[in-house]
Structures are given as C-alpha cells and as structure tokens.
Amino acid sequence: MRFVKGHGTENDFVIIPDVDGELELSGALVAALCDRRAGIGGDGVLRVVRTKLSPEVADQAGEAEWFMDYRNSDGSVAEMCGNGTRVFARYLVDSGLAGAGEFGVATRGGIKRVRLAETGDVTVDMGMPRVLGESSATVSGKEYGGLRVDMGNPHLACVIGDPVAGLDLTRQPGFDPAAFPHGVNVELLNAVGPRRVVMRVFERGSGETRSCGTGSVASAVAAARLAGETTGTWEVEVLGGTVTVTLDERTSYLSGPAVLVASGEVDL
Ligand SMILES: N[C@@H](CCC[C@H](N)C(=O)O)C(=O)O
C-alpha cells in the first residue's frame, strides 16, 4: 500500500491515496498504520478518495473533487480535522491532483475551502464555530470550566489561569457524557499576551497531540469570549508550533504550515 506522511504543526498523518475508492479501511488497519512502533506512526489517517465515489459525501461532489476521509489513530471516524485538511490540500497540490490556489475539500463536516500561499502556509475556511454553552473538564482531580464549541466535531475549550505546561494529559480528561455523548476533544489554554494563547489538547480517538486545528479555533473562540470580543486574529501556540486563527462575523479561518515529509510502500 502506498503512503505519504505529512504534518501540520506536528499534528501528523498517514495519507493513503485511494483515488478510485477500492480500499477497505478498517479500524484495525488505521490503528496499525498509526502505530508509532510497529507501523508508520500518526495521529490519524487521511484517505484520499474521489468525492463522487463516497456515498456519505457524494452530495458535495459538485464543489469538491476530493474527499478527506479522516480517521483517528484508534480507528474511529471523525467529522472534521482542521490540520488534516491543510495537509490534505498540500498533498493534493504536490501530487498534481489539484491546482495551486483555492479549492474545496469534502469532509464529513461539509465543504471546506482551502487556499495555498506561496510561503507554504495553507488556510482553511473552517466555517462558523457554534457555541453550545458551558461544561467542565477534570484533569488530575482538578475541575476546569470551559466552552462547548461545535466545529463539525465536538470541543470543550477551557481557559485556565495556570500555565498549561505542567498538566498531565497522559489520560483522557474527565467530561460530562450527557453534554458529549459522542466524546469530546478537550483544549486547555491560557492567555500569554493580547490575542495570543498557549494551548494543549487531548483529542478524542488520538490522545494528546502536538496540535489540533479545530481545537485551535475553539480555543480562540473561548479566549475571545473571555476578552469580550467576537472577531479578530489570535495566535495559538501549540506544542508543535503556532497557528493563526481569524474570527469574523461570518466564519473562521485556520492558517499555518503543512508539509509532506516521507513517502513509500507499507506492507502490514
Ligand atoms: N487534529 C484534528 C482533529 C481530529 C479529530 C478529532 N480527534 C475528533 O475525534 O474529533 C484537527 O486538527 O482538527
């Protein structure tokens, strides 16, 4: 099986080209590919398949030729992945499946428009974040209040007073299953300057990752709300670098680097 490895601020993915939709991507196969010792290693898999050949998103085929079939490293399916969309776009352009510039990508969370800059950065129109209210997460016995934000996938973004560096995120933070019946991605962040936050994330289905695009937008929304703002540009520092989030009256944008680092054949 041919693969390409890429990452966006070290949120890393195994990209599997399956343009004609011939592959049976089981949960076990995804987990084996993402295994960092026995496989290639990654936070998730991005299967590249024609939208029109994918019944669950075929209605998006008029606006996006390619479907990003995203899976978490434990094999579970997720609706959306912001960094994955940026890396997916980089792959499409570098492999000649899409022309440079601007185009749509089909996802389970709807069409995402992407724009590739000459600097190498990729920007995704992430849509309007939906704020669903408040909830809380528990880390090492301590409870943190946070904002429930729907980015196509579920988030709980908690602005905490303390630095996030010392938090133990080796285990899934506690959360209210009634508020998040399908699980949740938990962000913990603190403000380190005007419109600048440091964020760590525990992702549903993948554990702690070094960056999360949908989580960065959710974090910017939570930080903005605390500052009494609704629009503007936030820098989100993550373990793997920095991404930029812009909120406006209509939508949100995620920008940052997206790179491909390896390719080859895998026989699992
Ligand atoms: N890393 C992603 C989010 C991936 C999906 C998430 N783990 C979920 O299950 O919702 C991003 O960059 O947004």
Image (cartoon, rainbow, N blue to C red):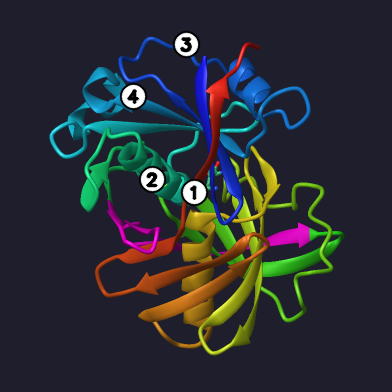
Q: Which residues are magenta?
A: 114-138
Q: Circle 2 is placed at which residue position?
A: 90
Label 4 close to label 3 by CB (< 8 Å): no
Residue sitting at x 84%, y 58%: 168
**Label 4 residue SS:** strand
The stretch drawn in magenta includes residue 165? no
Residue sitting at x 86%, y 59%: 140
Q: Circle 3 is placed at which residue position?
A: 24
Label 1, label 2: how far apart the Cα atoms are: 7 Å
Callout 1: CB less than 8 Å from ligand 1: no
Q: Circle 1 is placed at which residue position?
A: 259
Considering only order in the chain, which callout, 2 or 1, is on the residue closer to the N terminus?
2
Left/right of residue 253 with respect to residue 26 in the rendered view: left
**Label 3 residue SS:** loop
Q: Circle 4 is placed at which residue position?
A: 49
Image location of residue 9, percent across then percent down: 57, 57
Label 4, label 1: how far apart the Cα atoms are: 20 Å
Left/right of residue 137 with respect to residue 110 in the rendered view: right
Image location of residue 24, percent across then percent down: 47, 11
